[in-house]
Amino acid sequence: MKHEILRDSKVEAIAAQSSKDGKALCGDDYFFLATDEYFICVVADGLGSGEFAHESSRAVTDVVREYHEEDVDLLMDLCNRVLVQKRGAAVAIFKVYFKEKIFRYSCVGNIRFYLYPPNGKLVYPLPVTGYMSGRKQRFHTQEYSYVPNSRFLIHSDGFEMRGTKGFLGISSSLEVSANQLEHTNSAASDDITFIFGSLLA
C-alpha cells in the first residue's frame, strides 16, 4: 500500500491506498489538508476500476484541492458538476472547524465514516445510496460536535472494516493502529483507500 502522513498541532492523519489487482491506476483518490482554522478531507471512489474510475475520482479531489476553503455543501455541488460525462464516483467530504469544535460531513455512495470520541460514543453518519455523475441531486450534510483526541476513520468500500468501535478505542499510536488496519484487510480484489486520524485539539 502507498502511504501519506499528515502531522499538525491540531490533527494527525495517515492515508493508505492500493489498487485493484496491482493495477497502475487506482480508481480511488483522496485529498486532505490542515490549515490554522480547519481540516478538510475528501475520499472519492470512481465507479469500477482502472483508467476511467481514476479519471472520475481525481476530478473530484482536484476540485476540493482548489476550493478547499468553501463549505461542504458547495464543495459537494462542485464535485458533482465536474463529473458530467465521466463515469461517476462515490464521494465523501468532511471538514473540521477547530475553533467551533464541529465538523460537517456529506456523502453520496458507499464510503464509510466513523468518529470515536474519548467517551466511547461512536458517531457513524448513515451513508446515502447512489453516486455522483453530474445529475442534479440534493446532498444530506450533517453537523456534529467533537472533543479533542477523538479518532476518525474514513474508507472506500474496498476496505472491509470489522469491529470498528473496538478498534478505534485502542490507545496505541496512530502508526501502530494504521498498520494493524492495513493488515486486517489484505484483499487485492478492489481498490482500497482508508484514512485514519486523530483530532488533537
Image (tube, rainbow, N blue to C red):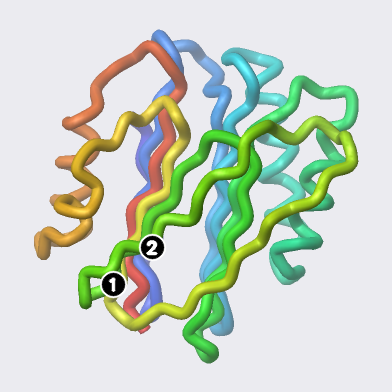
Left-right relation of 41 to 113:
right
Query: Dividing the picture into quarters, in which one does residue 50 lie?
Result: top right
Name the one closer to the observer, 42 or 110: 110
When the figure is inspected, residue 111 is found, relative to residue 195, above or below; the finding is above
When the figure is inspected, residue 107 is found, relative to residue 116, above or below; the finding is above
Disc 1 packing (10 Å; few <14; some 14–19; many ≥20): many
Name the one closer to the observer, 122 or 63: 122
- The spot of residue 127 in percent (x, y) is 54, 45
- The spot of residue 162 in percent (x, y) is 23, 37
Quadrant (top left/top right/bottom left/bottom right) for the C terminus? bottom left
When the figure is inspected, residue 66 is found, relative to residue 159, above or below; the finding is below
Query: Dividing the picture into quarters, in which one does residue 151 lie?
Result: bottom left
Q: Residue at x 66, y 15 (%)?
A: 51
Q: Residue at x 44, y 51 (%)?
A: 113
Say what amino acid the circle numbered 1 marks: Pro
The numbered mark, 1 or 2, whose residue comes first in the sequence reads 1
Name the one closer to the observer, 124 or 46: 124
Disc 2 packing (10 Å; few <14; some 14–19; many ≥20): some
Q: Residue at x 38, y 55 (%)?
A: 114
Q: Secondary structure at mark 1?
A: loop
Q: Residue at x 67, y 32 (%)?
A: 130
Q: Which mark is residue 123?
A: 2
In this view of the protein, can residue 120 be seen by the observer? yes
Which residue matches tag 1?
A: 117
